[in-house]
Amino acid sequence: MKIYRNSSFRIILMIFAMIVMLSCKSSAPLRIISNPNPWPDNYTPFSGMENYKKWGTYNVHDPACKKFGDTYYMYSTDAIFAENKDSAKKYNVPLGYIQVRKSKDLVNWTFVGWAFPEIPSQATDWVRSNSGGKGATNIWAPFIIHQNNVYRLYYCVSAFGEKTSYIGLAESSSPEGPWIQKGCVVRTNRETPMNAIDPTVIVNPENGETWMHYGSFFGGIYCVQLNPETGVTMKSGDLGHLVARRANYKKDNMEAPEIVYNPQLKKYYLFVSYDPLMTTYNVRVGRSDNPEGPFTDYAGKAMADTTDILPILTAPYRFDNHAGWAGTAHCGICSDGEGRYFMFHQGRLSPHNLLMVLHAREMFFTPDGWPVVSPERYTGTSDRKIQQKDLVGEWEVIRIQEPGHERQLEAGQILWGEGMLHKSEQNSSFHIKLTSDKNITGKYSGTWNFETPKSLTKIVLSNEEINNLVTFAAHDWENQTETILFTGLDKNGRTVWGKRVK
């Protein structure tokens, strides 16, 4: 037997052995690996005013997020659980202004502070002079954009339950400020058909046109053209045109538009939030070839002339081993600049739905060009390539549906004392098993198949085909493990979420 002593040859043998080992590792079935969550969902121990620097993912409401350089910046309504004015004064915590956070990885967030030292007087004067002295106690729903070498921060000030509202603009050379007030963009009162809240801005990359979408249950969502040089409306006093509404808009709430462009699909997507923010808040979406619309839904219905649209992407839900979430809407959308998208929204921890926790979800686009979001909050990226055998096992599945309980609302929100979900309003899970012979057993019977190159799963449950379920490895928050997830839409445009649990 010849013995090789050449060092170069030994190195080649070692490299070959490593390749074989890596190959064996990548071909092994995906194991469900224990991994702790990055933070607890119940933040009552950190809710005191003295702990505001620990509010990285806590007290998040109406988030807007954009990536500038290598850092993600988030701006949100200053909603605080267990707010205490005396304690806030003691610890120098301003109340009512825009909260600012930043992160390098979308997981670990630093609480930067507040954008403004006070509510701009021009906004306060407008609101209170048109609402009998009421309102203008808080700044709502900010939106950030970098344009013409400045950072533009849009915000709104309003009187709750009225159309008396004001969208203002501030500018800075840094996403952390300081901010210089530039004045009014749009303002409304009891005489106007729309409500000037919840701004979101998009730039048409082909011609540089800038459009702002805004509005609420008072009249629906409107779109107005902005001057890219100044950031305010192209025409003074222009309130824009209607792009989305619900038939009974005073009762059936719709608000919180978010507009985003996908350059690969060459489509503009208009996300909106339905129903009361503390309970059945849910995200819907329509799309258009143009930033100013018209927008249509999954079935081709016009968003400007319909009662309800689909797809429905998020809604109150509960997986096993967790209390569940309500208020899962008012979303912000952000791209990482490399083709990946993320959705951010509040989640209100059940059963009381008062704690507001940041939910960051990776967003995907189906082969037919509709956005879907991960069933779980983002905790990092896995480079694991899913294979068919990885799907064999027990799965927990949720079918996201519209609220099944008729509520009485006031100004689009729930009445006082009705802040807990009814059983029919929470989307709960069921279990199925995917077997190695591509059958489904459990609560429903059927078949399944997996397209390895595209990482798409097809399931047939009781003769209902659900195709193009985006499949990927990620974190299971409820079980504190790493596993496989899928997300997609059924034939009617309702979200289907799943995760392998055994």
Image (cartoon, rainbow, N blue to C red):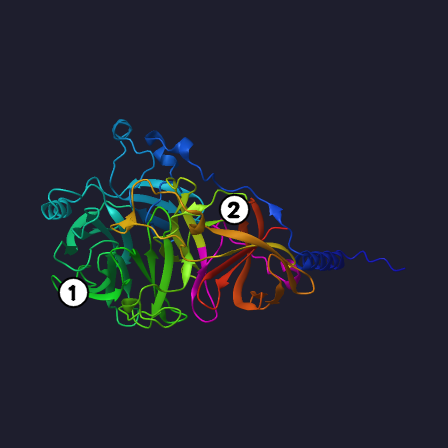
**Closer to viewer: mark 2 or mark 1:** 2
Residue 271 picture location, percent across and down? 34, 60
Q: Position of residue 59 (x, y in %)?
A: 35, 41
Q: Nearer the viewer, residue 320 or 226?
A: 320
Q: Is residue 368 magenta?
A: yes
Residue 100 lies left or right of residue 476; in this view the side is left
What is the secondary structure assignment of the residue under circle 1? loop
Task: Name the residue: 39% across, 36% down.
Answer: 54
Is 54 magenta? The answer is no
Residue at 22% across, 50% down: 156
| Predominant SS along the magenta part | loop
Q: Which quarter of the picture shows residue 208?
A: bottom left
Q: Is residue 106 above or below residue 231?
A: above
Name the amino acid type tagged 1.
Met
Place residue 53 in its image quadrant. Answer: top left
**Where 294 sits versus 84, above or below?**
below
Relative to the observer, which residue lies in front, 107 or 283?
283
Q: Measure how far apart labels 2 and 1 are at the Cα level.
A: 46 Å
Q: For the magenta stretch, what is the residue range?
A: 362-391
| Residue 418 visible to the viewer | yes
Q: Assign a secondary structure to mark 2.
A: loop
Instruction: State which quarter of the image contains the N terminus.
Output: bottom right
**Residue 52 x/y as whole percent:** 34, 34
Q: Is residue 388 left or right of residue 227?
A: right
Image vertical order of residue 460 relative to residue 480, above or below: below
Which residue is more in the foreground, 427 or 485? 427
Residue 175, visible in the rendered structure: no
- Residue 447 is labelled as none
| Picture disc at residue 234 | 1
Q: Which mark is residue 477?
A: 2
